[in-house]
Image (cartoon, grey):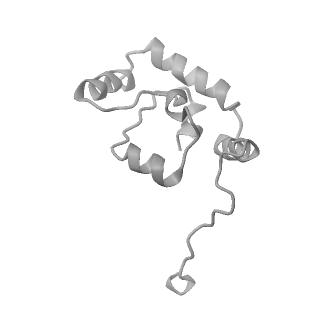
Amino acid sequence: VWTDYLALDRPIGFFLPDLEAYAHGRGVMEGWLEVLPGPTLRSPDDFESFGREVLGHADPAAAQMRRHALEVFEIVHRDRPADDLLDELSRRGALAVGARAPETDRRAV
């Protein structure tokens, strides 16, 4: 979702209470946390600072994080930036090979 929202150049914050489990369970590319387009919200002060930015108090450092992420992920303002990101991650070999979506019970539909 953040990849689509990034194109709007609006504040993005990341609340990752299960970061360690997520990183170990899914496997993520090295250094990914440093290129997120917004702050990692850990403390009450982090949330307050992010809230001020959401309310319109510009944060030049956060704006720079968004610009940097656009460059790193080579996201351009197009209709489907999330698809573009997934295509690029796949091209770079950053996605698990052979991963399958969970089977669904079609009878429940």
Residue at image point 53% right, 81% down: 109
> Outermost residue toward the left?
44
Residue 31, x across and y down, in percent: 55, 31
Q: Is residue 74 above or below residue 107?
A: above
> In this figure, what is the number of numbered marks?
0
Residue 24, x across and y down, in percent: 46, 50
- In the drawing, does residue 86 fall left or right of residue 50? right
Q: Is residue 44 above or below residue 106?
A: above
Residue at image point 55% right, 44% down: 28
Please tell me which residue lies in front, 98 or 44: 98
Q: Is residue 87 above or below residue 37?
A: below
Q: Which image quarter: residue 13? A: top left
Q: Which image quarter: residue 3? A: top right
> Outermost residue toward the bottom?
107
Residue at image point 47% right, 12% down: 60
Residue 59, x across and y down, in percent: 42, 15
- In the drawing, does residue 22 fall left or right of residue 42? right
Residue 7, x across and y down, in percent: 60, 31
Please tell me which residue lies in front, 17 or 21: 21
